[in-house]
Each structure stands twice: as C-alpha cells, then as structure tokens.
Image: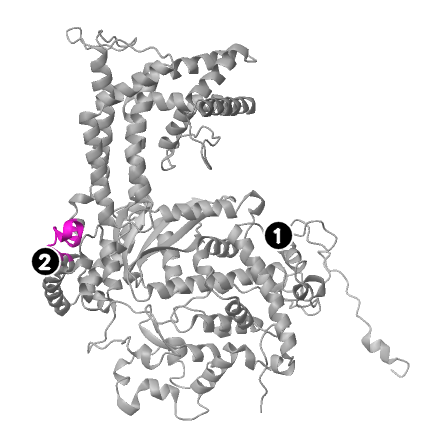
Amino acid sequence: MANRTIDSFFKKRRLEPNGSGEIPCPLRDSSPKHQTKKFCRAESLEFDISSIERDPGKRKSIWKYLEHQRDEVRRAYIKFGPYQPELPIESMVVDKKGRRFLFSWYKLFPDWLEFSPTKNAAFCLPCSLFSKPTDRFGSMAFTTSGFRSWKKVNDGKNCAFLNHIGKDPNSSHKVAMQCYHDLGNSLQHLDKIIEKQNSEQVAKNRLQLQVSIDAAKWCAFQAVAFRGHDESLDSNNRGNFIELIKHVSSYNEKVAAVVLDNAPRNASYTSPTIQKEILSIWSIKIQKHIREEISDSKFSILVDEAQDRSKREQMAIVLRFVDKQGYIRERFFDIVHVHETNSLTLKKEICDVLSRHNLSVQNIRGQGYDGASNMRGEWNGLQALFIQECPYAYYIHCFAHRLQLTLVATSQEVIPVEQFFTNLSLLINLVSSSCKRVDQLRVARAARIAELIAIDELETGRGQNQMGTLKRPGTTRWGSHFSSICSLFTEYEDICSVLIDVVNYGNTSTQRSEADRVYNFMTSFDFVLVMHMMRDILGFAQVLSQALQCKSQDILNALKLVSVTKDRLQSYRDNGWNELFTNVKTFGDARNIEMPDMNVIYKAGRGRIRKQNDPITMEHHYRIDVFLATVDSQILEMKNRFKEDVIELLILSSALHPKDNFQAFNIEQICQLANKFYSADFTDQKKLHLRTQLELFQIEFSCNSQLQNLSSLQELCQVLAKTRKSMCYTLIDRLIHLILTLPVSTATTERAFSAMKIIKTFLRSRMEEDFLANSMIMYIEKEIARTFDVNSIIDDFDKIKSRRAQFHMSHTVN
C-alpha cells in the first residue's frame, strides 16, 4: 500500500466484454429487466402542452411528471386557469338529500375552485399543482380524491371551502396560492431579479423578439414554409423566416443591431422551436378569443374528415354560434389527427378538444356532417352518440352536400344527360392531356377575342375576357358541373378549331380518329341541346349552392331558398321548352350545326325497341324523353333530398320568421317549439314568461318600424341586439339564438381542408400535428389574429418558461 500513488485511486477500471460482446455499465443494475438497456443515461422527453387533461378528475398528478417538466406543466395549467364547466342542471349528480355542486361557487372562489364532471367532485388547482401528497387525513380531498360533501359547504363559518383556505397565513393552501401566482408572474422569478438589466436592454430584447413574431405572423398568414433547406450562415437562401428578418433589418438600423448576427448566441430567438412557440401562443389566444365569443351561449359543431398530403386522416372542427351582436359565426377551432374514423373515436377526439377549452357537450344544440355512414348512422353514428349524451344536439345533413348529390344523381339518371357528361370528360381529356393542344386552344381563344373586340361584340375592361381552361366536372366538387359547362360555352368555337387541326394534322391515326369522333358528337344536335338545358338547370342550382355555402346562412332562409329553387325548376319545366329550343337553334345556325326536322318520326337507335303502334315525332322525343325527363328527375331528387320542410322542429321555427311583417307569427307554435324541442333551455316558469313576452312582442312589431320589412331571422336578431330590445325580450332572443345555431352546411370545414392543402404541401409533408393545427388556425382566423397586440404576444412568450433575455423591467426585492 505504501508504494501506491494517489493517481492509482482514480484510474478507470478496465471492463471486459461479456459473452454477448457488450461492455457492461458499472452503474447499470444487473437485474434481468435492465439487461436489454445499452445506455446509462436517461433520455428526457419533451412535454406536449396540448396533451394536458383539463378535467381534474382525470388529469395526471403533477408529481408523476419528470422533475424538469413540472414547472412547464404548471405554467400550462396556470395559463388555462381553473376548470369551471357549467353543465345543465338535469345532468348533475345529486346526493341522497338532493344536494349538488352549485356553479355560483365559481364566483365566490374564482382563483382556485374546480369541478370534475367525471368524478362529480370539487378540486383546488393551486394545491393540485404545488402541495405534496401526505398521509394526513383529508389532505387529499381537494387534490386527488376530490371533495363532494356538499352539505359542509353551506355551513357558515364551518364552510369546507373556507376551512380549506385556512386562517393561518402559512396554511398549505395559501402557500400553494403564493407559488401559483409567483410562477405565473415571470417578473418575480429569481433568475430575472439576479440578472437585472436596464430599460434600454429590455427595449432591445423586445424589439428583437417583435421582429421574430412579425416574421412568424407573415409566414403563417401567407401559408409559406418557415424553414429552408439550408439555413447555414453561408447559404444563399436560409428560408422565408430568416430571409424576411434579413430583409427587414436592411431597412432599419435599430432592427439590424439586435437580430441575427448581432443577437446573443444563446438568445437569438430564430430557431424552429421558437417559431413553433410563437405560433402556439397565437393559436391559443385565437381559441381563447373564440371561447370568449361563445361565452355561455349554446353552439353547434361542424365536423368533416379528409386526408392530408402525408396520407393522415385529419378531422376539422368548426363551431357555429350567435355572438352578442346577433351575427352568426362559424369559427375554425381545431384540426385533429385521427387514427380511426369510427364514430367512437371521432366522438372521443371532439370531446377532448371541447373539454380542453371548457366547452360542455351539454351545450351543443346542433350537429352538421356529411352523409357518411359513420356520421349519420341512426344507431351507432356520430350524431346518434352525441344525441344519447345531449338529446338537444339536433343533426342536420349538410344542405350543400345534398344538393351536390341531386346533381350527380340527375346526371346519371337520364341516358342522354349521362352520355353528355361522359363525352364531355372525353373531350376534356383529349384537349387537356397535351401541352401542344392547350397552347393551340389559347392561341385560338386570343385570336377570337381580338376579332370580336374589333367588331365591337365584346366589351373591354379590367378583368374581362380572361384566358381560361376547360374545367373538369367532379362528383365531390360543389358547382363543378356548372363551371365545366360554362367553360365549354366560352371556348366552344376554339375547341372545335383545335379538334379540326388534330383531325387533319395529328401525329397518329389513333389521335386523328379519336379527335374526329369527339368533334362529331360535339357538333351534334343532341350534345348542343343537353349543353343548353343543363346550363339552365345547373344555373338554378348554382345560385342555391352559393347561398348555402355562406357562413351566416340560417336554416329557415336555407329552406326558403330550396323552395324557391324548386319553384323555378317547376316553372322551367312548364314554360321553358320553347325558349330552350329557340336558343339551341340560334346557337346551331351560327355554327353550322345540322338541325333535325322535329315533325318526322323518331327512330330509336340500334338495339332499342319501341312499340310499332306508338310512333313519336322527333319533337316528342326531345321534349318528353329528354327535356321533361331531366327536369322531372331534378325536381324529384330535390324533394327526396330536402325533406326538412316536413320536420316539426323547422315548421314550428318558421312561426318566428319576420317575412312579410311577421305574417307567419304564431304564439302557440312558438311556445310548443320551446316546450318540445328546447325544454332544457326554458324552465316551467320561463315558459310562462315566454308566452307573456310573445304577446307583448306581437304588439311591438306591429307599431315599431325598426321591426318591419325584415327578410330573415338573422336580421331580426341583429335588430333586437342593436336596439337593445333583446334585454326586454330575453326569452324570445334566446329562442332565436337557438334556431340560428342550427347548422346549414359544412362549407366552412371544406374551406379548412382547402387551407390545409395550401399549408401542408409536398415539401412540407412532414409537419408536426401541432404545427399544422396552429398554422391552420392562424391562416383561417387571421381576422382574429390581427386584433392581438404584439406586446401581448411578447408577454405570453415570456410567461411560458424562463428566458435568457429579459423582456420586462425587474422589480427589486426588499
């Protein structure tokens, strides 16, 4: 031992490899459960703020998180605040004496009191986040197990809530509250107090962060990629985000002095993580704004699914409600990746999103989906599952989707119409499949426009006579059939000239024969007749389709528009043939199309047999077998698809419609509507008051000029809010809000998926789910995003976690 030096005590012990060739770790446990591990250190996992559970009865204990994650989790819960849902009274669980949790307690203890619907118990948010669990009796009541002894609340000085707070200044609850407020206030953090900086440095830090926030906002609003392929210092293109900051700094010396190369190496605030944090703050504020708009009002959910660029099934959630000014709002709220599309999975994801933002399923008053079986199923569909939980969440099949189904059915029901669209698809394939033919079509179009302008048959002006292309009809694209026929009308002569050129100078015999066949049916009377007829029929439907896709459309006005469209189709059926035939004849004569003799006997094509004793003329065939058959098919499909005019809910709702100075106003029907369909929103006493208000309102609208000449229920709601009559007729206003909340179409969800295609492109197909959701919320609801001041974004950014740079002046501690 005397010959040993001190260095020998610190020499590393040589480890021999074991039988498997792996060098064992001296710190690793030799038990079997650890033998498969290959590393000694534990990898820390990032915490996903969006995954926190708001319901205190279901959320994970703070002490089960990793130690370095706890403050981040606490800040997230502090950001959301106490979970304080307000459920319908009939859904509340009561004890044996009929006692239950009262929502008025929220106002008495707003800073800490929470309620869990799943456990029917009260909790304390600060104690759940900061009080360590102990074995003392009753210490877990407000943190883990929940408090539900309601008889002890209204017990005067012995109130259980007051006892929980305690009289001692150092009680566990008050200590937890102090920690709760200190962590929420970044100005009180010890590291900020120690690293006190002057006001000039704080201003520079805020300017530096403001530039990053503005760059992130611009990228999100324009739906462009943030990052570049190579963001190194010697790269020619470092991505939109950094390049935009460089561009802004080139015009402002103060900005150039605090960003990029002049920013601190450890606090440049341009990394991808910072970009995502900024977007997350924006989206959370937007969702919070929407939640405040809804307030305690009832709302409807609009849901649809679609695949994104990376083949992931995404579910878009839109909330429809009526704001305080009486306007109908449809707000894009979130998009969620779903692994399965069955109704149970969809319902769980929707409920999780609503619960996270303190929105109760019991407040849903309408559901709007497409006609998929997992959505509309009467027993196991999504609408049925929500109705089981909330009987007043009435399901409305998307009107615009139903209208598209009628058009598709009509295009397949009548043989000449089906042949027309089949040939139209062949025509579009032939012309659009070749770049050479597309160029020829454009040249022919430009030459014809110049010729028509020269002879004063076309008006000139900004936006007129634009060069277009043939549009393809699609079974799932609303209005695509009408757009396709309109583009065919515009470029009819140009297409004919291109086809003639292919017939004469095509490269192969196959191309020439196909072009000749397409040209022959395109210049036939049957093709031209159906083209004109479908333009008229689809024109009626297009007006209805555009109206149904309006966000502010209400259900009663939508039914009125459907009825008007049916009447127009019926009028067209009765009186439209002569005008249609005249238009076709004029069109054909101008283009040398051979017109058949309408008085000769019609001969069916080969293989089709008609009774010999029942000959018909050509006029009879085209008018009866083509024209009337097509229009009748359209009218029948619309009657079958739109049956809401026989549903009692909508019949009773029409009694409030202000059309023709409240000609349909009926007190008995309105009271029946509230009693039968919205009994949860009106107590027995309020139902009596509703009748009284209706009687007074009947006198009011007969002599008040502001309530006359209104055309829709939404206008009535806006007038009541503007004139503050809604304060006098509160129950009538509530009933109007409930009717306007019923959804009409899922057009807003379809627009959300269009935005998703713009944002998540092929080059951005690896976007994270949260990044995609935040980007879509920013892009779609940019109207709300613009209302937020950049200083509020900086403040929220500073509160998320401790930052190296200081964004506020520090306060000294005595």
Quadrant containing the C terminus is bottom right
* Magenta stretch holds residue 574: no
Q: Is the residue under label 1 in contact with that under label 2 (CB below 8 Å)?
A: no
x, y percentage for residue 205? Answer: 63, 71
Left or right of 581, for residue 511: right
Residue drawn at (81%, 76%), measured in percent from left and top?
10
Under mark 2, the amino acid is Ile
- Camera-side residue: 780 or 159? 780
Quadrant containing the N terminus is bottom right
Q: Secondary structure at mark 1?
A: helix
Q: Looking at the picture, does residue 652 appear above or below residue 278?
A: above
Q: Which residue is mark 2?
A: 667
Q: Which residues are magenta?
A: 651-673
- Camera-side residue: 378 or 432? 432
Q: Which residue is mark 1?
A: 240
Left or right of 550, for residue 640: left
Magenta-drawn stretch, dominant element (helix, strand or loop): helix
Q: Is residue 372 in view from this perspective? A: no
Under mark 1, the amino acid is Asn
Residue drawn at (29%, 55%), measured in percent from left and top?
386
Q: Quadrant of residue 13?
A: bottom right
Residue drawn at (44%, 57%), measured in percent from left and top?
783
